Amino acid sequence: MPWIRRGQAALLLAPMEGVTDAPMRALLTEHAAFTHCVTEFLRISQVVLPRRCYPRHAIELQTGSRTPGGVPVIFQLLGGHAERLALSAALAVEMGAQGIDLNFGCPAPTVNKHDGGATLLKYPERIEGIVRAVREAVPAAIPVSAKLRLGWEDPAAIYENAERAARGGAAWITIHGRTKAQGYRPPAYWGPIGALQKSLGIPVVANGEIWTLEDFQRCREETGCEHFMIGRGALANPYLPALIARELGLPAAAVPTAFPSSEEWRALLTRFIAISQPLSDNPAYALRRIKQWLRYVANRQPFADFDRLKRLGSIEELQALLPTLQIF
Ligand SMILES: Cc1cc2nc3c(=O)[nH]c(=O)nc-3n(C[C@H](O)[C@H](O)[C@H](O)COP(=O)(O)O)c2cc1C
């Protein structure tokens, strides 16, 4: 059961809608390092989605809610209607989900306009009500967690929102150290995460702007946390989770260097293509994902062949370029 407990370190792969889908989760959890991953959000709006939608959203429901590497997958729901979320959570569990996470952080205007994600940060009592309704709808053995930003505009909102989530029965909370108004602008503010980690009584997972081992070390020092979630940093450097896991004393394959060489990148991309082929019948899929993935790399450091890669029109062209692709 994928519980997160005090005294037991954890490293979670962040949910990233349109990015950390099943093939990417499979790749990034192939060599352990992550102890958990969270699906992209499934939005519950006007109706409870029918059964077929759940395994489509998380193919891992068909394999014991674990990635091919054996890492537990937590199923994330987003919405503002407690009863519909509770019914959806119960269905997800019936279909095989082993843990439910509730999204109270998404800043996308379309989501927020329809009473979902970060909008709920303005209504602490609704956060408590939603967590409680979902908690009561699924068996006690299934953890229900919540993922929050610091607030809508006021970062101090996290204190009441976190308390409410805990009172509603959250097994743990993840805090992305920014308000909705701060979007994704650096820095992330880890201070309140540290304060809540000490006072809340349930585990607190620290999240936001961990790009390097040094960022992780600073975050651990500033927050005192033993649970961390990383998203973009794992895409920009797929070796980062292993480096962090080893610092946390978690089992993780040794990585040869702090950052993959061009040759190792080629192996990672080749592996991603192989993983995604049986999972997507769209021939453009792997190329699109790889371009998006490598943009996270190019945004962080010089990337010799990114311009060439950006212009590729087919997976065949990518395969032709791969043997000589230079990352740096
Ligand atoms: C493209 C993108 C999609 C995201 N989708 C989700 C999502 O579906 N659910 C969620 O809770 N957070 C989502 N997030 C937020 C991340 O989980 C994470 O909190 C944020 O990226 C900060 O962590 P990082 O600095 O390690 O990337 C998304 C972030 C990005 C950049």
Image (tube, rainbow, N blue to C red):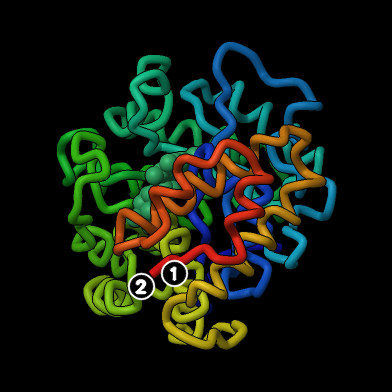
Amino acid marked by disc 1: His
Q: Nearer the viewer, residue 95 or 299?
A: 299
Q: How many marks do you count on the picture?
A: 2
Which secondary structure lies at badge 1?
strand
Q: Which mark is residue 225?
A: 2
Which residue was labeled with disc 1? 227
Residue farthest top in this picture:
46
Q: Return the x and y of residue 302 as percentages of the image width and height.
A: 30, 63
Q: Return the x and y of residue 134 as percentages of the image width and height.
A: 59, 36
Amino acid marked by disc 2: Cys
In the image, what residue occupies the spot 58% across and 56% down? 321
- Quadrant (top left/top right/bottom left/bottom right) for the N terminus: bottom right
Please say whether residue 102 is visible from this viewpoint: no
Query: Vertical placement of 1 versus 314: above or below?
Result: below
**Badge 1 density bin: few <14, some 14–19, many ≥20, Cα 10 Å:** many
Query: Vertical placement of 96 versus 130: above or below?
Result: below
In the image, what residue occupies the spot 61% across and 21% down? 84
Left or right: 295, with 220 as reference point: right
**Badge 2 density bin: few <14, some 14–19, many ≥20, Cα 10 Å:** many
